[in-house]
Amino acid sequence: MKLSKSFVPTLKEVPNDAVVASHVYMLRSGMIRMLSAGIYSFLPLGYKVIKKISQIIREEMDFIGGQEFHLPGLNPREIWEESNRVEAFGETMFHIKNRDYILAPTHEEIMTFHARNVVKSYKELPQIWYQIQTKFRNEARPRSGVIRGRQFLMKDSYSFDATWEGLDKSYELHDKAYRRIFDRCDLKYFIVGASSGAMGGTGSEEFMVQSDAGEDTVAYCKSCGYAANVEVAKSRINSIKYDEKSSELKEIYTPNVKSIDELCEYLKINESQCAKSRVYIHNEKPILVLMSGNDEVNEVKLEKILGGAVRPAHTEELKEITGADAGSIGPIGFKGRIISDNQLINANNMYSGANKNDFHIGGIDFKRDVIEIEYFDLRVVKSGEECPNCSCKLEVFSAIELGHIFKLGTKYSNSMGANFLDESGKENPLIMGSYGIGVERVMACFIEQHHDENGIIWDKTLAPFQIHLIGLNMKKQEVVDATEKIYSDFKTNGIDVLFDDRVDAQAGFKFKDADLLGMPIQIIVGDKKLKENKVEIKIRKTNERIEVIIDELQSKVKDLIS
Ligand code: ATP
Ligand code: MG
């Protein structure tokens, strides 16, 4: 491809709204352009990479017996009502005005629709069906370029099995395929246990890439490899020590003291002597959640324990339920269910709100004073705490989710009535799994992991072109002749080459563009070296420069590529 005739609109400056490296470089290298918030167009160079990633995914899905579909993005809402997911997706689902249609955010329902009444017998199972197709989600905060878009490309696959052991196998196959896909894309990733979220189901794992641009938080143990989304992560933490003597309950005047820090400061006590109170509403009933000190409530854990959605109580509700505002609430005299983090199991001589503004209560002995209380693991794990499997320290960091595998079970086959006949002729619901990869996220994560201050550093697998051929002074006929010959030789040899044949661009400008676009091998052709019949090769990744005689160029490049 010749740059003079191509649409590769590179940018010198960092675009205003781009912060994350992959977003900056995808825009600057002319691979994508934003159409509107969270909606991106892929330009020719960027689309070449998307096609390469898709091809790798396709090969690995075919290898595990996957069959490729192409489902419509425009779906009748009716089908989504069958599984009750119009409600589950809520605002994230795009609806078509005045019509009974939605834009599909994923395709469990549609695949189940195709399996229903068609896959009839255990003899036809297992099946793995996949597609690489556009999804639509009205994300509240689209950001970081294509990492969180409102329209994005997903490889989604669905397995249908007759037995739970079968589902385990289909899940295993996907796990292996995902490892091969991400290995082939040269991504450093790790696998974490996850919460199944709106998808429902029994087991799930996420493939994560560590990155400050990530919106997920992960706890990771370097020594034993334990890794979990903080939504579900555990740590080993001691319960608070029980003092030998419990003092009496006493009400203390604490004017304007609202936070745990203010309370510690005012009473000259330690954070670990304070029980923090949070009121949540679950099934329209209030629940008081107690945490040690400044520990945060893990709402995902809380929802799992309570078996359904929770929300923090509003200011007015707080007043009505407890008689006090946030900051003055506590377990003594609280009417309603009280649950507490495990850490408080043995706690005594504790301080908490008095359910009366400007007052706290001291001397709380949980065993003595808060009788109807239940204890669970409710904490958000923090960096430096002990790993639950070994005693090493956990690291907590941000990560981007590349892919997700779920054991769905029978959630969709039950709600939508997709059954098969087993060996004894009995009707059973199909046992399903669902598995996703964000194709653009693979590209963005690759760039996050492979760039420097000058631009992207592709390796041969995903590079839009293997070679970036630079004609330094295209006003000189000898440079034109030599570069044209090199260009056509590469094409004849089946090597993808991008040719900077622009006549008016200065050398410095061309070098900057070559580093920005980041093809693995640059070939620099200038009139001085040509006099010795030589050209220069620059390896983008190492900056190594090699002079070669033109006659040996093709074989040298072949060696470098392999
Ligand atoms: P997230 O937690 O990041 O919103 P998700 O759990 O909603 O992701 P899934 O429904 O499991 O994602 O979708 C499968 C894959 O699709 C994800 O692993 C991710 O790679 C990709 N993906 C999801 N949402 C987006 C988005 N808004 N933009 C780009 N890719 C996305
Ligand atoms: Mg999401």
Image: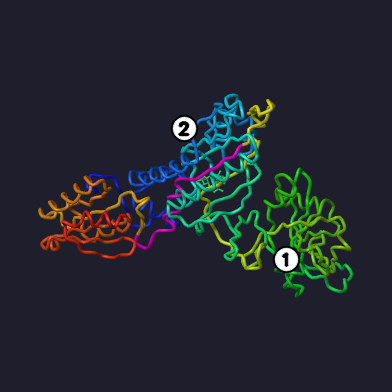
Q: Quadrant of residue 238?
A: bottom right
Is 209 magenta? The answer is no
> 233 and 334: which one is in front?
233
Residue at image point 70% right, 57% down: 297
Residue 531 pos. (x, y %): 10, 62
> 320 and 353: which one is in front?
353
Q: Amino acid at mark 2?
A: His
Residue 361 pos. (x, y %): 83, 66
Alpha-carbon span between mark 2 and mark 1: 52 Å
| Ligand 1 lies under 8 Å from the Cβ of mark 2 | no
Any mark on residue 293, and which?
Answer: 1
Q: In the image, is residue 221 above or below residue 505?
A: below
Any mark on residue 70, and which?
Answer: 2
Residue furthest to the front: 423
Tell me where the magenta segment starts and ends, as one range.
432-454
Residue at image point 88% right, 62% down: 369
- What coloring was used for the rendering? rainbow
Q: Quadrant of residue 199?
A: top right
Q: Secondary structure at mark 1?
A: loop
Residue 392 pos. (x, y %): 63, 68
Q: Answer left or right for 406 relative to 22.
A: right
Of the image marks 2 and 1, the number of the one nearer the N terminus: 2
Residue at image point 52% right, 34% down: 103
Q: Nearer the viewer, mark 2 or mark 1?
A: 2
Q: Amino acid at mark 1?
A: Gly
Residue 265 pos. (x, y %): 72, 73
